[in-house]
Amino acid sequence: MQPLEALPLADLRERSSAKWRAYPADVLPLFVAETDFALAPAISARLRRAVELGDTGYTAPGSGVREAYAGFAGRRFGWHPDPALMRTTCDVMMGVVEILRQVTRPGDRVIVMPPVYPPFFDAVAEAGAVVSRVPLVEGPEGPEIDLAGVDAALAAGARAVLLCHPHNPTGTVHQRRTLERLAELAAAHDAVVLSDEIHAPLAQPEAGFVPFLAVSDTAASVGFALVSASKAFNLAGLKCAIMVAATPERFGTLRSLPVEVEWRTGIFGAHAAIAAFADSDEWLGALLARLDVNRRLLDDLLASHLPLARFRIPPAGYLGWVDLSAYEWGDDPGRRILREARVAFHFGPQFGAEGRGHVRINFGCDPDVLREAVARVGALARA
């Protein structure tokens, strides 16, 4: 499939989103998880029609988002979740907070696996719980879940596990056998697993992504999934996510959430999600083809310009987790890179102590932008 082409840089600089307004115009922004492509045609068409109709009111619970996602999951993952066991909300992290409030009590511990998406730490605190850190460990194929550490934390009283699958920032796609064991541990300790699967549509075909709720009956009995079209289709500002259960018992938790949790779903987000999940498979295929090219390009660029960097090509997503410790630019090398090379990467320590010496690079952009960014940092290393 022909890789998707990014929009011209001049057009991108007209955007008002965080990626293009957080820094001055001389900075190349490769930090926040926004991509540089035009919307999928089906999404643009549906949003234009909504504007023409003045369809800007409240989102109906029966909007069609749940059914669209169920169809998408069946085509992409061979998983057929029941739309009747889903509810929508504003975004994935709001869903995480609201579910945690139902399944934990104030002061309960929730397992988080750093380095991980920074809002995970804040979400646990917002829900009134306390973070229990179980960092990823280095396995033969890359970072993986420390199952022994999870077992120990659950035995010590943790009541929930906040899973990132695929993992942000490493791009790890957790394997079925690992997820099966995680579910067994949760069941043995009467805990629950919340699986943030927002990056799932971005798993490359060979990665073998399996939704957590689909790995076993045990996983279905202990888990919730939180999904959205926002990362793959660049819709974060439109505000729509889905909370998924796989058993009537777990859906009881979702049913008990305050009605306002569902009413916060944005109607443009619902429109866009339906178009994304139901009518944008070809566009997504072209995006994945572009990201495959770019992730390999990033590997080559780092080898050429920053040969001491440590990087593993991620099996999912458009985020590269890069260890720059060998350059001795301090715990937070992204700060110096921003100041002296005028390139904005995501600051590694924000993902936890395990992010010291690291940066996260968003390669969901034009290859020439990626080349220029890494070349600038390479020049800094040679200075």
Image: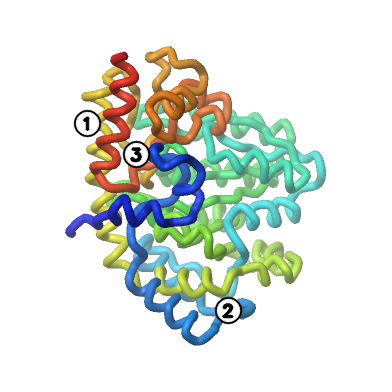
Q: Can residue 61 be seen at all in this image of the molecule?
A: no
Please tell me whether mark 3 sits on a helix, a strand or a loop. Answer: loop
The residue where tag 3 is placed is 314
x and y percentages locating residue 185 in the rendered image:
60, 41
Colouring of the image: rainbow
Q: Residue at x 60, y 50 (%)?
A: 194
Mark 1 or 2, nearer chain start: 2
Q: Position of residue 30 (x, y in %)?
A: 40, 40
Q: Is residue 198 above or below residue 22?
A: below
Q: Are marks 1 and 3 in contact (CB under 8 Å)?
A: no
Q: Residue at x 38, y 47 (%)?
A: 317
Q: Do we see residue 283 in this rendering?
A: yes
Secondary structure beneath disc 1? helix
State the separation of the CA atoms marked 1 and 3: 14 Å
Q: Name which residue type carries label 3.
A: Pro
Q: Which residue is mark 1?
A: 300
Q: Nearer the viewer, mark 1 or mark 2?
A: 2
**What amino acid is found at the position of numbered circle 1 in the picture?**
Asp
The reply, left or right, for residue 352 in relation to residue 284 is right
Task: Measure the alpha-carbon separation of dots 1 and 2.
Answer: 46 Å
Q: Nearer the viewer, residue 37 or 282?
A: 37
- Which residue corresponds to mark 2? 56
Q: Label 2 sits on what residue type? A: Thr
Which of the two discs, 1 and 3, labels the residue nearer the N terminus? 1
